[in-house]
Amino acid sequence: MKKIVVLSGAGVSAESGLKTFRDNDGLWNNYRIEEVATPEAWEDDMELVLDFYNQRRKQLYEVEPNPAHFALARLEEKFDVDVITQNVDDLHERAGSKKVLHLHGELKKVRSTRDPKLVYVLDGWELKNGDTCELGSQLRPHIVWFGEMVPNMLPASEIASLAEIFIVVGTSLQVYPAAGLLRYVRPEAEKYLIDPNAHDFSYIPNLKFIRDKAGVAVPILVDNLMKTLDK
């Protein structure tokens, strides 16, 4: 089976109704990065950080995958598909994608502040001060905060290097280190960038631009890719 690797960003989740940090009406308007998404914020005001992620988690339970999520999952009928996502939601999984690698953590999971290897699925949407791991230490959101290492970058780069078709959707490729994944994709691989405001990456070989929303463009692209195997 031909290998397809998808890199997805906040634009895909936004079409399901989730606010994004980068949008004009997104969460950055209400919170500064330093207040809610850094290790220093956790040390300075744990209650604020807990509430911020509790509200994001609560909203996640109120939304559903959109046509882009479902279309990408449908690719697995005829292709070997890996999804690398910058998103912390579980919408890809809920749509049916089997192999999803989260670069920036997972909103529905929490982890120990003493041993980061102790990761748990949170029961419900609310994580409270006093909720502890088996070692007795406070649990924190299982999120990669600004200033922290991105442990899944190495496996992500290895997956990207195997792509015969590489699809970028919902991200402007302006946020590193995730944007650097294109460097690992072989020059001869087919590449698609789906973004209504795509920047000029014309120097990248075999890259095709699709300037439209994910919910519109992804199902069309998936249909076309599926048809190539029917010929």
Image (spheres, rainbow, N blue to C red):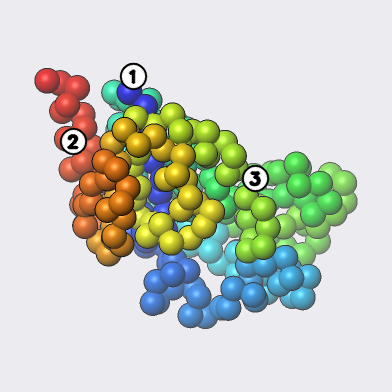
Could you tell me residue 212's position as x and y percent?
21, 57
Tell me the SS state at disc 1: loop
The foreground one among 31 and 207 is: 207
Q: Residues within 10 Å of mark 3 (few under 14, many from 20)?
A: few
**Distance in Å between CA atoms under marks 2 and 1:** 17 Å
Residue under the point 32% across and 47% down = 204
Q: Residues within 10 Å of mark 2 (few under 14, many from 20)?
A: few
Q: Tell which circle, 3 or 2, labels the residue nearer the N-terminal end.
A: 3
Residue 151 has which mark? 3
Vertical order, 161 against 133 (above or below): above
* Residue type, label 3: Pro
Q: Tell which circle, 1 or 3, labels the residue nearer the N-terminal end.
A: 1
* Residue type, label 2: Asp
Q: Nearer the viewer, mark 2 or mark 1?
A: 1
* Residue type, label 1: Met
Asked whether the beta carbons under mark 1 and mark 3 sit within 8 Å of each other, the answer is: no
Q: Which residue is mark 1?
A: 1
Residue under the point 77% across and 65% down = 129
Could you tell me residue 23's position as x and y percent?
39, 71
Asked whether the beta carbons under mark 2 and mark 1 sit within 8 Å of each other, the answer is: no
Query: Would you say residue 222 is visible in this rendering?
Result: yes
Residue 223 has which mark? 2
